[in-house]
């Protein structure tokens, strides 16, 4: 649903690498990533679920690749021994942003987490669909999406960028377990926004940005949380990042949300939301009668 995508834009924004783009891909082009360990029947079912076009460009993802890019951040048991989760990328128009949809079979990585990792790796302006034949973590799809982007753009994404994207995703996952997915994503976005406005000159300034961002959101971070975030953002700031563009992307997200809420679809969503809470309150009242 569109409101879900717009909220994802607001809650999840990461680092943009403007030098990376879909060099050889045009809007509407579709790239499919498939886990290597899918059976033929599972592949057929997934391609049908994705509404894949005839003869799409297909990228195969191996379990070894999953461990290569996620093994430093996720326990081996959670990554597993088979690559099953799969995804499709439909290239969008310039400035359309990321639209991420994840099915119920993906149990570990949320839409927000995919968006974080993909934008950090340089992916933008694309419609993403992630699925699997059964309940899986979703790590193969993440690895595949980054691999597919690299192949379609005909540009080699630096290894430190890939590692940073995965580390950011995992750190957001850790925070979401303590504070919820929305607050975790909002915290990451707020820290990036502050860095885009006023780049910290030293660790003390970075620490202040992190603590103030958490306080503004009503989040209480432990010393360990702060240390991990400082380590992550110090790594990110060492990469070739256009922080001005980070700020511009945040502004674009807010603009999209404002336009949506002012639209007929947005008003219908708000009306349904109000109706839901009214019905919920009535149900609670009836329960106590």
Image (spheres, rainbow, N blue to C red):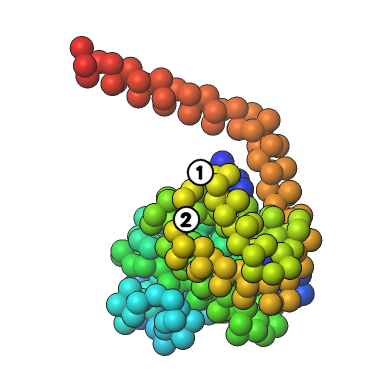
Numbered label tally: 2
For the C terminus, the image quarter is top left
Q: Is residue 207 visible?
A: yes
Q: Nearer the viewer, residue 171 or 47?
A: 171
Q: What residue sits right under mark 1 in the picture?
A: 218
Graded by Cα atoms within 10 Å as few (under 14), some (14 to 19) or many (20 or more), the crowding at tag 1 reads few
Q: Position of residue 269 (x, y in %)?
A: 54, 31
Q: Quadrant of residue 75?
A: bottom left
Graded by Cα atoms within 10 Å as few (under 14), some (14 to 19) or many (20 or more), the crowding at tag 2 reads some
Check the image and report above or below for 261 versus 87: above
**Residue at left offset 51%, top offset 68%:** 227
Left or right position of 284 against 6: left
Checking the image for residue 221, the label placed there is 2
Report how far apart the C-alphas of labels 2 and 1 lie in the structure: 10 Å
Circle 2 SS class: loop
Q: Position of residue 256 (x, y in %)?
A: 69, 43
Q: Nearer the viewer, residue 195 or 260?
A: 195
Circle 1 SS class: loop
Q: Is residue 154 visible?
A: no
Q: Position of residue 69 (x, y in %)?
A: 49, 81
């Amino acid at each position: 649903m569109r409101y879900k995508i717009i909220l994802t834009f607001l809650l999840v924004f990461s680092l943009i690498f403007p030098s990376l783009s879909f060099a050889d891909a045009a809007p509407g082009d579709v790239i499919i990533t498939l886990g290597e360990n899918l059976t033929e029947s599972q592949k057929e079912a997934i391609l049908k679920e994705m509404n894949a076009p005839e003869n799409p460009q297909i990228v195969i993802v191996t379990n070894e690749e999953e461990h290569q890019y996620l093994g430093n951040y996720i326990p081996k048991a959670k990554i597993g021994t088979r690559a099953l989760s799969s995804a499709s990328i439909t290239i969008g128009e310039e400035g359309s942003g990321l639209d991420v949809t994840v099915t119920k079979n993906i149990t570990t990585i949320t839409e927000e987490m995919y968006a974080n990792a993909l934008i950090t790796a340089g992916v933008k302006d694309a419609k993403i669909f992630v699925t699997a034949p059964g309940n899986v973590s979703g790590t193969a799809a993440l690895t595949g999406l980054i691999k597919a982007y690299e192949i379609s753009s005909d540009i080699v994404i630096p290894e430190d960028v890939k590692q940073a994207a995965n580390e950011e995703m995992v750190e957001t996952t850790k925070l979401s377990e303590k504070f919820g997915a929305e607050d975790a994503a909002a915290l990451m976005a707020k820290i990036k926004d502050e860095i885009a406005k006023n780049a910290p000159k030293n660790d003390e300034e970075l620490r202040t940005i992190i603590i103030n961002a958490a306080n503004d959101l009503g989040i209480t971070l432990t010393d360990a949380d702060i240390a991990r975030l400082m380590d992550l953002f110090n790594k990110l700031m060492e990469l070739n990042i256009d922080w001005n563009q980070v700020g511009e992307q945040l502004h674009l997200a807010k603009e999209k949300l404002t336009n949506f809420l002012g639209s007929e679809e947005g008003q219908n969503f708000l009306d349904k939301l109000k109706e839901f809470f009214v019905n919920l309150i009535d149900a609670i009242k009836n329960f106590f009668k």
